[in-house]
Amino acid sequence: MKSSTLAEALNIIWKTPPELRANVAYTLVRQLSREEVELLTAWDYRATFNEKADSRLVSANSAIDNTRLLSYSDAPWVRVADTEPVFEVHSVAELLLAAQFARDHLDSLLLSPSDMRDRQISALSTNWRIEEQRLRRLFSSFDNEVRQAR
C-alpha cells in the first residue's frame, strides 16, 4: 500500500463483500504504520474509557505495570495511561471495521428508525465481536481525524 495506508485499508474493506470484511481487516492490520495504529487506538481509548485522558502507544514489551492498559491481539503495541489499573484486550482489525462503517454508513444508520438502527448495531456488534456499548461509543466519537486519514 502507498502513502495513506489507513485510507486505502478503509477503501479496500468498503469494496470487499461483507462476509469477507473481517478476514480482510485482519490482513490489512499488518500494513498499517505505527502512526495509523496510534490514531485508531487513541479513538478506541476515548470510546472505551469515555475520556480523553493522556494515553500513549508503546511497544507491548515496554508496557508498565499498574497502568491502564489496552492490549491489541493483532498488533505489537499497547495503549497505556497513568490511571487506575485496568486491562482489556481489543483488536485493531475490529477498529478498521468500525472506522470503515462509520466513514461510509454512519450517516445512513443515524437516519434509520431507532428499532432498525438498534438491530443493525446489535448485528454489527455480534459480527465484529465488539461489545455493543463500546461500538456505540466508537460510532459517537468517530471524528474527522480518523475519517480524513491521509
Image (cartoon, rainbow, N blue to C red):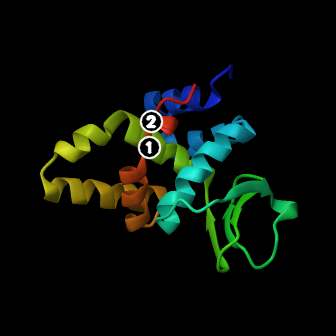
Q: Which quarter shows the N terminus?
A: top right
Residue 126 to residue 94: above or below: below
Near mark 1 (Cα within 10 A), the count class, few <14, some 14-19 or many ≥20, is few
* Secondary structure at numbered mark 2: helix
Residue most toward the left?
113
Residue most toward the top?
2
Q: Amino acid at mark 1?
A: Glu
Residue 70 to residue 86: above or below: above
**In this rendering, the label closer to the viewer, 1 or 2:** 2
- Determine which residue is flagged by label 1: 19
**Between 75 and 36, the one nearer to me in the picture:** 36
Query: Where in the figure is residue 28, as x and y percent of width and height?
Result: 64, 37
Query: Where in the figure is residue 101, as x and y percent of width and height?
Result: 40, 41
Q: Which quarter shows the C terminus?
A: top right
Image point (17%, 43%), residue name: 111
* Secondary structure at numbered mark 1: helix
Image point (45%, 27%), residue name: 15
Q: Give the distance between the C-alpha atoms of the residues marked 1 and 2, in whole angstroms.
A: 27 Å
Instruction: Give residue 144's mark.
Output: 2
Instruction: Give residue 79's mark.
Output: none
Residue 60 to residue 39: above or below: below
